[in-house]
């Protein structure tokens, strides 16, 4: 699209000379006004169809600075150039910032210099317009990204809510089958998350811990109720059957997309650092941090809760047993220490008051 320049001067000879020069050399569209008031009301300025204004300084009724200021109030993006006589130079310089002049030219001007100034001014405007357009595009893209993120976040939250509902249902299945572990799965989930917070784990890991802890025993649905609810000590054969719940739990959750990050902890929450655990006899760093956390939470809750063959143990005795387990290389020392620190703060025992 061709450029449009407004030339405003009360002297017809000036406007004729300038418009002819610009049309011949630059091939731009030029609109001429000999009255600044009329120029302010022009269609070009009103509808922002002008790229540059070249205005004289001394004009009757309204000087060039006043006119350009009003013109820029209507259209801030227009490029203003002021023509001045030598005696008006000082006033023009003082008003540059006020009006936002791009340039001022003293009369008489040099035609080659004038053409160069016009070209540079319009190139600057093109660059500015391009940057503004790019900024608008980036802003629109940013808004679109935020909109899509909001939708994804909503969908993700829905998935999380669905997963939580599924977890609650699964936990209820476990506790309905094993009457002696009422509240155990829920508490292990909460304790695991609390331990994770103490260890400084990110929110994603905390959610994963809470979910894994809550359903760590889901495999018990595949264990006979006779074994689960036996009031006395299990035989070796019965214990072997009980130990299968870790693998069964993994197999139950494996087809569920929302449970993929929980599979390791479900399978390995009975592994011991010294390799004496099950089902895979993992040792040391072979056991994930999530599985180690849930192991500590699981053992603590089992000791501190009432069982069919005993009442819940005093807290001091629970601590001593867990210290022994840690000394024997079964439990993670750092996680057990974190548990003890939380116990000292009352943040674990409070969970049992619900």
Image: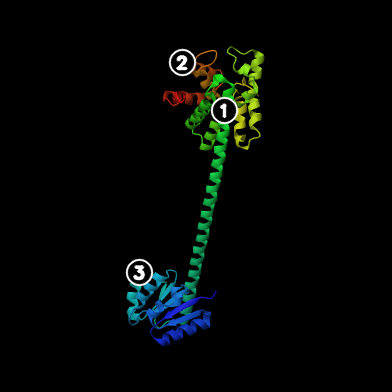
| Closer-to-camera residue (141/257) | 257
The residue under label 1 is 171
- Is residue 66 something one can see in this rendering? yes
Label 1: state its secondary structure: helix
Quarter of the view holding residue 233: top right
| Cα gap from disc 3 to disc 2, whole angstroms | 81 Å
* Mark nearer the N terminus (2 vs 1): 1
Q: Is residue 201 left or right of residue 103?
A: right
The residue carrying mark 3 is 98
On the image, the x and y values in percent for residue 337 come to 48, 24
- Please tell me whether mark 2 sits on a helix, a strand or a loop: loop
Decide: few, some or many residues near mark 3? Use Cα within 10 Å; few <14, some 14-19, many ≥20.
Answer: few
Residue 217 screen position, x and y as percent? 59, 25
Confirm whether residue 282 shows in the render.
no
Within 10 angstroms of label 2, few (less than 14), some, or many (20 or more) residues?
A: few
Quadrant housing residue 107:
bottom left
Badge nearest the viewer, 2 or 1? 1
Disc 3 + disc 1, Cβ < 8 Å? no
Marks 2 and 1 sit apart, C-alpha to C-alpha, by: 27 Å
Residue in the picture at 53% in, 51% down: 147
Q: Residue 19, percent across and down?
A: 47, 83
Q: Which element is circle 3 on? A: helix
Mark 3 vs mark 1, CA separation in Å: 72 Å
Which-is-in-front pick, marks 3 and 2?
Answer: 2
Name the foreground residue: 44 vs 326.
Answer: 44
Residue matched to label 2: 314
Residue 169, position as x, y percentages in the image: 57, 30
Disc number placed over residue 327 in the picture, else none: none
């Amino acid at each position: 699209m061709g450029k449009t320049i407004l030339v405003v001067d009360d002297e017809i000879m000036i406007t004729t000379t300038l418009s002819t020069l610009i049309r011949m050399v630059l091939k731009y569209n030029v609109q001429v006004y000999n009255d600044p008031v009329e120029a302010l009301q022009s269609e070009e300025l009103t509808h922002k169809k002008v790229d540059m204004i070249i205005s004289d300084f001394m004009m009757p009724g309204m000087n060039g600075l006043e006119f350009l200021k009003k013109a820029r109030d209507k259209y801030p993006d227009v490029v203003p150039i002021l023509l001045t006589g030598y005696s008006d130079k000082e006033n023009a310089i003082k008003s540059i910032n006020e009006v936002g002049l791009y340039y001022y030219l003293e009369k008489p001007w040099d035609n080659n210099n004038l053409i160069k100034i016009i070209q540079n001014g319009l190139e600057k405007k093109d660059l500015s317009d391009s940057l503004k357009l790019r900024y608008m595009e980036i802003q629109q893209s940013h808004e679109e990204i935020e909109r899509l993120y909001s939708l994804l976040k909503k969908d993700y939250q829905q998935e999380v809510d669905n997963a939580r509902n599924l977890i609650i249902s699964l936990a209820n299945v476990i506790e309905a089958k094993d009457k002696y572990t009422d509240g155990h799965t829920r508490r292990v989930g909460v304790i695991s998350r609390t331990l994770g917070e103490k260890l400084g784990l990110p929110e994603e890991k905390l959610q994963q811990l809470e979910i894994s802890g809550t359903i760590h025993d889901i495999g018990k649905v595949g264990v006979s109720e006779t074994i689960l609810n036996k009031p006395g000590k299990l035989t070796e054969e019965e214990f072997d059957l009980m130990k299968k719940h870790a693998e069964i739990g993994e197999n139950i959750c494996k087809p569920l997309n929302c449970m993929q990050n929980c599979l390791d902890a479900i399978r390995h929450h009975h592994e011991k650092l010294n390799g004496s655990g099950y089902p895979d006899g993992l040792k040391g760093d072979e056991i994930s941090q999530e599985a180690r956390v849930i192991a500590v939470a699981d053992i603590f809750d089992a000791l501190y809760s009432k069982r069919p063959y005993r009442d819940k143990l005093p807290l001091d005795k629970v601590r001593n047993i867990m210290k022994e387990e840690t000394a024997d290389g079964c439990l993670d020392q750092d996680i057990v220490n974190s548990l003890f620190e939380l116990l000292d703060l009352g943040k674990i025992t409070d969970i049992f008051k619900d």
